[in-house]
Amino acid sequence: MRKFLSLVLAFVMLFNLCGASFAAPAAKKIGISMPTQSLERWNRDGEYLKAQFDAAGYETMLTYSDNKNDQQVNDIDNMISWGADLLIVAAIDGDGLNTVMDRAAEAGIPVISYDRLIGNDAVTYYISFDNYTVGTLQGRFIEKALDLVNAAAAKKSYNIEFTAGDPADNNAGYFFNGAYDVLKPYIESGVLKVPSGQTEFQQVATAQWSTDTALARAQNILGSYYADGTVLHAWMCSNDSTSAGVAQALDSDYAGDNPVVLTGQDGDIANLANIVDGKQTMTVYKNVANEAVVTLEVAKAMLSGEVDGAALAKTFPVECAYDTTSYFTSPGHYTPSFLLVPTVVTKDNLNYLVETGLYEMGADGYLKSK
Ligand code: GAL
């Protein structure tokens, strides 16, 4: 009996030992702070990021801050108190998170600036798409659609207007500059005219990327400069939420029956419907599911020690550049960045979206989210 008991005891001790050595380590905690649920893309980002990290065994806290900087500061503070091991932040205001970023740095929590760059050196990595290229694609699209290269020789000129994004969003300037740099020579040569005269970023910016604000400004411009029958040929919009406002204004306040070349960005469902209906001409699509995949891989590497960014970027299942010279959080303080590649989507290649597996074509001819 005694022999039996000591055998049981030995077994229990062995079991405990094994238990101790094989117990799963406490899951690392990931704070995911997204700006707002009012725009389609951030819902997708939040959903994909959370799903990726949950599936990889991390504990996640996901917040949306209703486009309010104070709320985002509060949300990030909560993540710090919760004991986050890493923060993923898409900033509402790139310069509005300074103090909370300092608190994250004091607590030793690394930060991934997600999609939008935060102006604070606490940022460890920046993960986004090539934002300047997004704008370049929009500018080149207009250049090609209006055949601007041959316009001067053909003695033709065209009218264009601009709508950019939120000045608080670091991306907005990159998008605008990317497009404007392509179109500027044509404006300077007189091939492109801007009847409103509004070509400065601050004049054409849209606080919070609001559809209503873009709509009101477009109605104003159409009423002031096009009501006399002046023909509008193109409207460069930096993204889909603003493009939706401009498309609505063209519907209600533009008498011309020519199709206006109208750009966008994101591939929001409502805008894809506008593309099918001919009310928007293109969108620059950014696969945010891939952005989430890259973010998971970078986070894993960060949490397990040193990151060799250039080597890591080569291991991703999607095309992504490692860039250490384009973005900085303060003068001279460059942020290592992982930049994915955007794609132009028009009526002619909507199937590209279906092929991502994230959209499906409805029987009515409109794309739906899967
Ligand atoms: C940008 C983002 C775009 C667009 C916009 C409005 O920062 O890169 O994809 O969604 O914000 O939310």
Image (tube, helix red, strand yellow):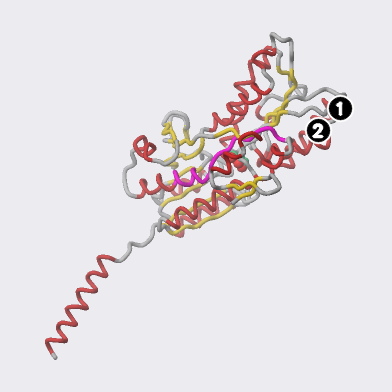
Looking at the image, the residue that sits furthest to the top is 153
Which one is earlier in the sequence, the residue at label 2 or at label 1? 2
Q: Is residue 53 left or right of residue 199?
A: left
**Which residue is label 1 attached to?**
227
Residue 19 percent across, percent down from the top left: 26, 70
Q: How many marks?
A: 2
| 52 or 205, nearer to the observer | 52
- Callout 2: CB less than 8 Å from ligand 1: no
* Other residues around mark 1 within 10 Å, as few (<14) / some (14–19) / many (≥20): some
User: What is the CA distance from the residue labelled 2 to the residue labelled 1?
Assistant: 10 Å
The type of residue carrying mark 2 is: Asn
CB-based contact (under 8 Å), mark 2 and mark 1: no
Q: Residue at x 76, y 34 (%)?
A: 217
| Quadrant of the rendering where the N terminus is positioned | bottom left
Residue 220, numbered label: 2
- Vertical placement of residue 258 versus 69, above or below: above
The kind of secondary structure element at disc 1 is loop
Q: Is residue 294 rendered magenta in the image?
A: yes
* Other residues around mark 2 within 10 Å, as few (<14) / some (14–19) / many (≥20): some
Q: Splitting the image into 4 quarters, where does residue 94 fall? A: top right
- Vertical placement of residue 6 versus 219, above or below: below
Q: Splitting the image into 4 quarters, where does residue 206 fall? A: top right
Q: Is residue 12 left or right of residue 42?
A: left
- Vertical placement of residue 312 versus 369, above or below: above
Q: Residue at x 55, y 44 (%)?
A: 91
Q: Splitting the image into 4 quarters, where does residue 163 fall? A: top right
Residue 21 percent across, percent down from the top left: 25, 65
Residue 47 percent across, percent down from the top left: 54, 53
